[in-house]
Image (cartoon, rainbow, N blue to C red):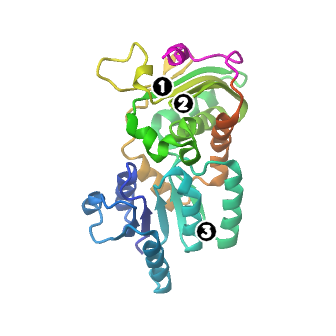
Amino acid sequence: MTTRYALIGAAGYIAPRHLKAIKETGGTLDVAYDVTDSVGIMDSHFPDAAFFTEFERFEADVYRRGRDGDGIDYVGICSPNYLHKAHMAFSLRGGADAICEKPLVLHPEDLDDLAALEAETGKTIYSILQLRLHPAILALKERIAAGPADKIYDVDLGYFTSRGAWYHASWKGFEHKSGGIATNIGVHFFDMLAFVFGALRENVVHYRAADAAAGYLEFDKARVRWILSINRYHLPAHTPAGQTTHRSITVEGEEIEFSGGFTDLHTASYQGILEGQGFGLEQVRPSIEVVSNIRTAPIEPNRGERHPDLGKVVAA
C-alpha cells in the first residue's frame, strides 16, 4: 500500500529534499501547504497534489481524508522553527506521524509536551538528523569508538555561511522565531558532536550576537572549540577568493571532509523512518539542550579554549 504524505512549507528552501525523498521511497504527496504559492517545484514530483495557502483549508482537507478512509500517514514539516511544535501537534492530532526538520523545537520543555501528545495519540514524531547518516560522520564515530577508551579528542568546528540583509528581516533574524544563530545554523552540528563524542559535560559561550556565536564544549570524548557566523566579513583570511562559505571540522588537526554526500541523505532519512529506524524525541533532546543553553548562558570569553577564528569575528 502506498504511503501517503502531506507537506507543510512546500515553498521553502528545504522542501525539494522532502519531495525527492517521498518520491524515491515510493510514497505519494496528497496535499501540501505554504503561505506563499511559489511551489512550482511540486510539478517535478507530484503535480496532482492538492495545495493550499490557508492553513484552515489545508487542515480541513487532511481531516477529510482521514474520515474518508484515505488518511495521511506522515506530515513532512519544513515550516519556520517557531511553528514546528504547533505543526507537529496538528499532525499527531490529525492521525499522522510527523517528520520534522531541525531544530525540532526551540526549548527542551517543548519535547516533554510533545512526548505527552505522542502517548495520547499513539503517533510518533521523527526528526531529520541527516549528519548521523553521512558516511564520513559514521566512519568518524566508528574510529572514535575503536580508539583508546580514555582518549579525549581536540576538535575545532568552524562554519561561516554568508547571508545578506534579507536574513535579518526574515523570521530567521528574530531569536524568538529562529532560536538565534546557534539554533538555526548550528543545531545539526551540535547533534553530530554528541552523536560521535558522547554526552555533554560543559557548555561555555565566548561570544553571542545576531550574526555570530562561539564557544567551548566538552563531551565525554572531546574538547570542542566552535564558531558560527553568517557575516561575510567574518570569513577566515584563508578562504578562497569568491567563496562565500567556509566549513571546517578538524579532529586532532585532521580535516573531516563531509562537504559531499548530502544529496540523498533526506531520502535515507525517510527510508529509515519507514523501516522503523527514525530519530525520535529523546535522540533530539541533547542538541536542543545545548542550543537552548547557548541562547541564555552568560558570556565567559576567558573560560575554556577559544576558536582560533574568534579574534576576527570580535574585531569585525
* Label 3 sits on residue: 123
| Mark earlier in primary sequence (2, 3) | 3
Pointer 3 with pointer 1, Cβ within 8 A: no
Picture coordinates of residue 176, whole percent (x, y): 59, 46
Amino acid type at image mark 3: Lys
Marked residue nearer the N-terminal end (1 or 2): 2
Q: Position of residue 306 (x, y in %)?
A: 62, 16
Q: Which residue is mark 2?
A: 140
Compared to residue 294, the image places residue 12 above or below, namely: below
Element on which disc 3 rests: loop
Residue 35 in the image, given as x and y percentages of width and height: 40, 61
- At mark 2, the secondary structure is helix
Residue that badge 1 annotates = 256
| Residue 277 visible to the viewer | no
Give the label, 1 or 2, closer to the camera.
1
Where is 196 relative to 286, above or below?
Answer: above
Dot 2, how many residues are within 10 Å of its Cα: few (below 14), some (14-19), or many (20+)? some
What segment carries the magenta color? Answer: 300-316
Q: Residue visible at 43% across and 70% down?
A: 3
**Nearest to the observer: residue 197 or residue 126:** 126
> Magenta stretch: residue 269 in it?
no
First in sequence, mark 3 or 1: give its number. Answer: 3
Image quadrant for the N terminus? Answer: bottom left
